[in-house]
Image (cartoon, coloured by chain):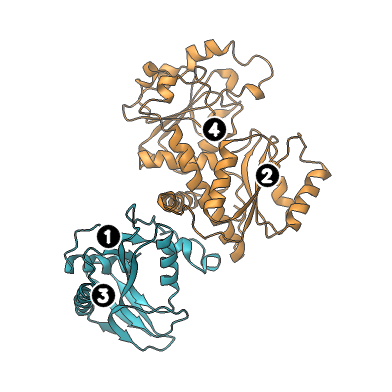
Chain colours: A cyan, B orange
Amino acid sequence: MTVLDAQQLIDKLGHDLGAFLDKRNITEPLLVGVRTGGVWIAEQMQSILKSKEELGVLDITFYRDDFSRAGIQPTVKPSHLPLNITDRHIVLIDDVLYTGRTVRAALNEIFDYGRPASVSLAILVERNGRELPVQADVVGTRLSLDAAQHVQLSGPHPIVLEIVD
Amino acid sequence: MRHFLDIGRLNCKELTHILDTAKSFTSVEGQTVKKVPLLRGKTIVNLFFEPSTRTRTTFELAAKRLSADVLNISVATSATVKGESLLDTLFSLEAMNTDIFIVRHPESGAAEFIAKHVAPHISIINAGDGRHAHPTQALLDAFTIREHHQDFSKLNIAIVGDILHSRVARSQIEALNILGTREIRVIAPRTLLPANIEQLGVQVFQDCTQGLRDVDVIIMLRLQKERMQGAFIPSEHEYFQLYGLTPERLALANPEAIVMHPGPINRGVEISSEVADGPQSVILQQVKYGIAVRMAILSIAISTGERGVDHET
C-alpha cells in the first residue's frame, strides 16, 4: 500500500484547472462533482478557484451500465444541478479516471438536465485501463498500475489517497 | 425482493431502503429530460382488473421515467382468481417477454395467486387486492410523512374513516408499525371497523374529538360506497357531522400536523374543502411522491430479479 500526497495533487489540479479555464476564456465555470469522492475534490476546486457558484452534484447510479449486476446501493442520493445548465461551461470533476464508464454515465446525466456549452474533465488521479474513448483535460497525476491495484480515496477531512494492492 | 405483495414481509431496514431509494428519484422530475435510463429495454405491464386513475397513471409515469416500455391492460370484467382465463392471459403476456406485472384486482390475494403462477423471470407488484393490501400506497404515505416529520418514534398518527373496507389502512398500519411509530390511532364508527382491529397494534377511538387530540398526522380515508351493501352509516350527512375533517376538528391536532388522503376525496363527506385545500393538506404531495416511490419499487424488483437474489419479499 502506497500513500500519495493528496493535498499536493489537489493543489496542482486546482492550479492547472485555473490555467486551463483562463486559456479557454471560461470565467464562470459550473463545477460538478461525481458523488462521492468527486464532490470532495470539487469542493476543493471551488475554494482554490474562489468560485462563488453553487456546486453541482451528480449521483450516476441510475445511469450506470452495470445496474442489473450491481443493484441499487443503499447510499444513492439525489443529484443536484442548477435549474438551467444550458449554455454553461461545465467542469466535471472526479477522483479517479479508470475505465471511463463513470464519465460516460455522468455525461448522459448532464445532458438530461440541458445542453451545456462545453464539458471539461478534471481528474485527481488518472490511471491506465480505459475501456471507453474518454480522456481528462486536467489531471493531478497520471499513474500506471497493475490491473490488480486500485486507487482508494477517503475523506473528506482530510482527503487521503492510497494505492491498494 | 422479486415480488412486492404486501408490507408485512418487509423489515424496517428494507422498508427504509425503499424510502431512501425513492428520495434519490425525486431529482429526476427536476431534469429537463424527466427520465433516467435504468430500466431501458424492460417491459412493464399494468394489469388492472379494477378501475384506478392515480395508481395506474403514477405507475405508468414511474415506469416511463425509468425508460421502461409500458403496456396498459384493463380487464373490465370481474374475472375471478380461479378461472383458467386469467392464467391464459398471464401466459400470453409472459410470452411477450415482459418483466413486471403491476396487478390491481378486486379479490384479496389475487397478486399472490398470480405470483405463484408466473414464470420465474417475472416480478409481481401488488397495486391493491380486494380488502387485503395496497403496499405502494402505504409506502408513499410513509414517504410523505417522513418528508415532514423525520422521526416516526415521536409521532402520533390517526387514521380516520372506513377502515373496514380499506386495504390502504391495513397496509398503512403495518408500515407505520414497522417504522416504529409511537402511536397509531384508528378513528371510526364500530360499523366501519374490522373485528379485532386492536390486535394490529392500534388504539381505537370512536370519538373524533378524543382521537384527534395532539396527533401529528391525520390520514383520512375515503368512504367506499361502492363496496358497501347495507347500512354501515345512517347517512353521508351524519357521517360528516361525526367524522368529517373540518377546520375545527383539525385544530385539535398538533399545529404542525399534516392532513393526508389517498384519494379520490369525497368533499363534504369525509373532509371539508377548506381542509382539503388548506395549508396543512399534503394530499397532492402524496400523488407526486407516489411516482418516486413506485420508481424505487420497480427498479429494486428488476435489479433483484436479474441478480437472482430471490428471497420472495
Q: Secondary structure at mark 4?
A: helix
Mark 3 → mark 2, Cα distance in angstroms? 51 Å
Question: In the rendered view, would you say B35 is above or below B145?
Answer: below
In terms of sequence position, does the residue under pointer 3 or pointer 1 come before the other? Answer: 1
Label 2 is placed on what type of residue? Ala
Q: Amino acid at mark 1?
A: Leu
Q: Which residue is mark 4?
A: B169
Chain of the residue that carries numbered disc 3 in the rendered image: A
> Looking at numbered disc 3 in the image, what kind of residue is underneath it?
Val
* For the residues bearing labels 3 and 2, Cβ distance under 8 angstroms: no
SS for tag 2?
helix
- Residue at 39% over, 60% down: A115
Residue lying at 60% horizontally and 26% vertically, measured from the top left: B164
Closer to us: mark 2 or mark 1?
1
Residue A46 x %, y %? 21, 65
Q: Nearer the viewer, mark 3 or mark 1?
A: 1
Distance from Cα at disc 1 to Cα at disc 4: 42 Å
Residue picked out by circle 2: B111
- Residue tagged by mark 3? A160
Q: Is residue B3 visible?
A: yes
Q: Nearer the viewer, residue B43 or B50?
A: B43
- What is the secondary structure assignment of the residue under circle 1? loop
> Does the residue at mark 4 contact the one at mark 3 (Cβ under 8 Å)?
no
* Mark 4 vs mark 2, CA separation in Å: 18 Å
Q: Are callouts 3 and 2 both on one chain? A: no
Crowd around label 2: few <14 · some 14–19 · many ≥20 (10 Å): many
Q: Disc 4 marks which amino acid? A: Ala
**Residue beneath label 1, please?**
A55
Using the numbered discs, state the Cα–Cα distance from disc 2 to disc 1 in whole angstroms.
Answer: 45 Å
Q: Are marks 2 and 1 on the same chain?
A: no
